[in-house]
Amino acid sequence: MRGGIGNALSVLDALSDRVNRGIEAFLAFLALGMSVLISVQVFSRYFLNHSLFWSEEIGRICLVWITFLGASAVYKRNGHLGLDFFVKFLPERLRFFLRLVVLVLGMAFFAIMVRYGISFAQFATIQKTAALGLPLAIPYAVLPVSGALFLLHGLSHLLRLLHDSGE
């Protein structure tokens, strides 16, 4: 069984790593674009006395996407804060079990994000943003996208935990 988990883990880790590198590059592009856009907006408003009415809306959409995609990228790297003060004092088997429960519950939540995120984004297609008239599905689409990324990384973490516990 360890060989099967090891093979699946190798494939899934490679996929998770590759996807995460792409997401991190996209995040850098979004952050840079948002920074330039907001800087141009500030310059335009205060020095040219002309406001770019659409820039705040685009900046807000970028920020929402940066937040959710960034959270998934940090999850991939196990970078989220955790309270492990008491967990460190537990026996090894109980720590393994708790980590397993946390991963499974997290993956259930991520699956809910995907399922209801798709429904919510579909519902929001008829609604439009105020300034540009873009479908609200654009900012809401990040829910199922990031949920799928979280699921991918969570499955990778789960297989890693199972593989490492069998050694």
Image (spheres, rainbow, N blue to C red):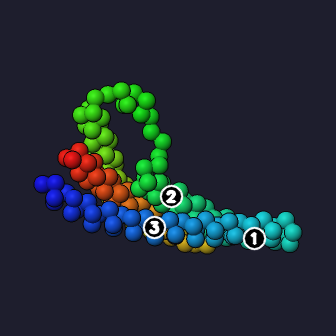
Amino acid bearing label 3 = Arg
Rendering coords of residue 74 (x, y %)? 47, 54
Residue picked out by circle 1: 40
In-image side of 166 versus 140 (left or right): left
Rendering coords of residue 146 (x, y %)? 42, 60
**Residue ID at (26%, 48%):** 164
Can residue 10 be seen here? The reply is yes
> First in sequence: mark 2 or mark 3?
3
Amino acid bearing label 2 = Gly
Q: Please tell me whether mark 1 sits on a helix, a strand or a loop.
A: helix
- Residue 33 sits in quarter: bottom right
Residue picked out by circle 2: 70
The correct choice, above or below, for 30 with respect to 165 in the image is: below
Rendering coords of residue 32 (x, y %)? 64, 68
Q: Which disc, if any, is residue 21?
A: 3
Gap between marks 2 and 3 measured at Cα: 12 Å
Which mark is in front, 2 or 1?
A: 2
